[in-house]
Amino acid sequence: MGQGAPRRGQAGDGELLGALAAGDAAALGSLYDRYSSVVFALCVRILGSRADAEEVLADVFWELWSRPGRYDPGRGNLLAYLGTLARSRAVDRLRSRRSRAMREATAADPPAEAGSPLDEAVFGERRRLVQRALGELTPDQRQAIELSFYSGLSHAEISDELREPLGTIKSRIRSGLVRLRDSLRTLHEGPSPS
Amino acid sequence: MTCDERRDLWLLLAAGALDADEQRALLQHVDGGCPRCAGARSEAEAVLAHLPLALAPVAPPAGLRERLVRRATGAPQPAERGPERGRPSLGAAPERARSRRWLAAAAVLALAAAVAGVAWRQAALESRGLRDEIARLWTMLEEARGIVAAREAEIRSLQSRIDDQTHLLASYRSPDTSIFSLAGTDASPAAAGRLFWEKGSGRWELHAAGLEPPGPEKTYQLWFVTGDGRKVSAGTFDVRPGDEVATLDGLAPFELAEVAAAAVTDEPAGGSPQPTGAMRLLGQVRES
């Protein structure tokens, strides 16, 4: 990240959310610095278009600013909330676009880091754990989960695309997610960056 | 349906793989106040929510941050923010017109107060910024400590497994150690066992693979059968879901030559004085 804008000191997510709810726009900037590159990567992956992804990213952070009370810390950390929001909106947009032919190559996307070296260290550790957990899945499980999560396809559509029975697809997704849940248990129970 | 059975369904719900009826039934259950399923639901949502972390982060377009912050600075949150203090009430009665001089004086005073307020707020923010930064660094330090502690626990667990394997290898190589095979019975055809017996010390160790968890209120029990037909309990062990190999060890109260066979049965939790359940593993204990 680091786009040259003035930054306030780094606080925890809870403090920043409190300040944001009180109308402090700088807190929105700090949370954007921390999470935008991860959320943007998700939007680009789903939509395949940087222009569309930018709109969804702006929409997600504006939603956070406009309705901070919608985030319930009891349901998960802030990144989980932002990711869920971004995925939902990106998939809606993808479905309304009805054509994935507009996807652009994303290989040239510039890599980014989280808001600070310490943020990057924490995200890097979590990324390593998630990548390792995904690596433990069978290729079939991983393909089914990624199609389900990133493509915006329904499970029936995935079944058509892979030419496999719907029950097989659901079973792969279920067994893969169970395995992921077990592999990521340390992540859920471990330290949170917020 | 039990909450255990529902646990996997929350994953399917989070992935959008449940049909409307299944989804409704699941949500009705958790809306009824089941804390266990509420936890399982959060856990399932977290599993899905962590997937984007596997992606390499991508820098958003330059300028978007500034536009967002600028827009936020100029626009209060309309949906949740109450009326701002100092904002005129829509229902207030209009005041009488005052002279331009009074208005100008009031404007100057208001401007001075605003400048003073901004300066004070700026100083307060700078001080608060430093405190925030220190608090943030402490939080990050705690997180780093947590990560280190998790890695250390992983290393200890791996070291323990290495020690076990080293010991097993040493036992396997020792000429003083005899190894006997136990085969799965019809009740557990996929099971197999190895019994290691150090003749000098009388120490033995059983490795049992392919056994399913014994079921609720049940356990597995190892028996040594002596040449004269006595069945002597050697202890109980459990198998958890996902366990590849279960082990049990101990010191034998008799010589190896007195033992004719070894068997594993399933028994009520806590074990039995004599075998009562189905035999799962069986092998002869005789040196060739």
Image (cartoon, coloured by chain):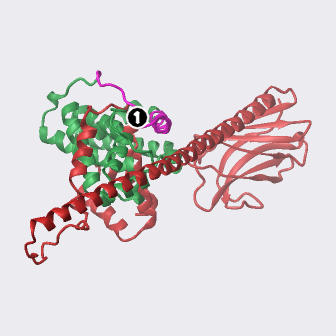
Chain colours: A green, B red
In the image, the segment drawn in magenta is A107-133
- Badge 1 is on which residue? B54
Q: What residue occupies the far front of the structure in this picture?
A: B101
Percent coordinates x, y for residue B32 in the rendering: 36, 71
Q: Is residue A54 visible?
A: yes
Q: Chain of mark 1?
A: B
Residue A177 place in picture, x, y as percent: 40, 44
| Kind of residue at badge 1 | Ala
Residue B41 appears in the picture as rendered? no
Residue at x-position 24% and y-position 45%: B70
Q: Would residue A167 appear left or right of B231 to someone viewing this image? A: left
Name, please, the residue furthest toward the left: B97
Residue at x 71% of width, y 61% of height: B270
Using the image, determine if residue A97 lies above or below residue B125: above
* Local crowd size for mark 1, using a 10 Å CA cut-off: few (<14), some (14–19), many (≥20): many
State the quadrant of the N terminus of chain B.
bottom left
